Amino acid sequence: MNITAPWMIKEESSYKHYSNQNLTQTTITFFNDRYNFTITNFDNELVGGTKQEWKTILNQLGQKLEQPTSPTTGEEKVKLEYDLTKIKRTEFPIILDPQNASFTDVATHAFLRQRLGQHTIEKRLSTARFMETHTVPVNFRAPTVKNFMAHMDYREQVENAGNGALSNEWKTMRMFLKAYGIEIWSYKAPSQPVYRVRIIPFPDQVYTMLNLTYSDDPYENALIQYLLTHNFIVGWRFPSEPTEMKTTNVNIERGYITITEPKKHHSTRNIAPAEIMTSRYRKSFKNWIDNWRPKVENQYSKDHLYLKPDGKPFTTDTMRQLLNRKATPLIQTVFPQYYNYCSRHFSAVSRLIRTKLEYKTFDEYEVRDWLGHSKIETTMGYIKDAKRYYLLAPYDWIHRVLKAPIR
């Protein structure tokens, strides 16, 4: 079968981000008229001060930014559907032309030349679309350090973006610069705090969350309850890892599940969540596969473990939206600080507490293998939280959540 690379595809009906179309030059206007701060410009001179406008600062850069393009073109869907692994490396250019390259071209370059994983590339393309359509947009057709720094300064000083957001945008920019053969600029995101206290729910609060009524539709309600239960007990990376789960990844007979890790180039790990594998009285994997999943299974389902009410498998976006829209508002009446990823933090702390109860010490290596951390330092970062929560609730959190007998 002949494979046509993305840069060879000509789509008349969809607009390319980096096409040769003439775009109207425009000056940016901002939502706020005045700010009270001081900023360093690119000649190391101080500008700004009381009521200094960002518009004035940008004009001092001598640069008018192009009007951002729409982030919802048909071509961007290629990044999800096109199989990057089938592209011939020898036929792909070493360096791309920013004036003509599309997002798909940059994604292909990142995969072939920069050795980035597809999941990482998708996240950075999403970030690029955000940067391109931001109030202070980044011009990816003619990238300059002044344009980029104007965006980053605004994000940090006006929007109070932190280390995580700014670092992600900087990684995205570097991916594009490498694709264009442009020397990497000098930029450093603000330092991340060495330790930040994690606020997680206590077991009784989690138990309440898992038993709330989230929908009048019995299947949808069960779907959310089971998904939340598995999130808190397994502690996988939500939503990328549960989205990847297949029924064949659940080995009921041997009592373990195989988790695919998109973040780590689709490597896998096995864990044995015994409490929710086969129990008839809990929201176990066996109950889900035998009793609930068949209610909506159809020709579109394939062997995906979690199915939408229409029987189709989830994407990471649709799974995130399900909990954000259907579950999060109600959960926050029980635990106001809830967000989806806190289930992973809860699992890390609860499993460290379990090792303390069993071995009289916190075993970070056992928990590292459970959570799939690449570095042991990541797991050790949870020990301070585990010590604090252990003093407040020195019992097995997992059994408490499931109302299981204490061992």
Image (cartoon, rainbow, N blue to C red):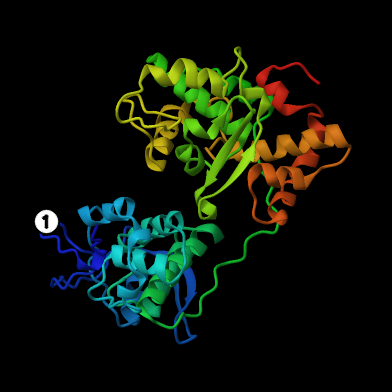
Decide if residue 36 is in sight here: no
Which x, y percent locates residue 276? 62, 24
Query: Which residue sits furthest front?
Result: 1
Decide if residue 353 is in sight here: yes
Please name the residue shown 60% across and 32% down the image: 232
Q: For this view, does 118 lie left or right of residue 129?
A: right
Q: Quickly name the residue at label 1.
A: 13
Q: Quadrant of residue 53?
A: bottom left
Q: Which amino acid does label 1 sit on?
A: Ser
Nearest to the observer: residue 132 or residue 372: 372
Q: In which quarter of the image is residue 345?
A: top right
In this rendering, the count of numbered labels is 1
Which x, y percent locates residue 23? 16, 70
Q: In which quarter of the image is residue 321?
A: top left
Please determine whether, in this image, residue 64 is positioned above or below residue 403: below
Q: For this view, does 310 lie left or right of residue 22?
A: right
Q: For this view, does 239 lie left or right of residue 135?
A: right
In the rendered image, the quadrant that contains the N terminus is bottom left
Query: Which residue sits furthest left?
Result: 12
Please name the residue shown 30% across and 74% down the image: 91
Please name the residue shown 33% across and 26% down the image: 311
Tag 1 secondary structure: loop
Please determine whether, in this image, residue 286 is positioned above or below residue 62: above
Nearest to the observer: residue 275 or residue 394: 275
In the rendered image, the quadrant that contains the C terminus is top right
Which x, y percent locates residue 400? 71, 22
Q: Label 1 neighbourhood size at 10 Å, few (<14), some (14-19), many (20+)? A: few
Please determine whether, in this image, residue 345 is positioned above or below residue 161: above
Query: Which residue sits furthest right?
Result: 360
Nearest to the observer: residue 178 or residue 55: 178
Which x, y percent locates residue 313? 37, 33
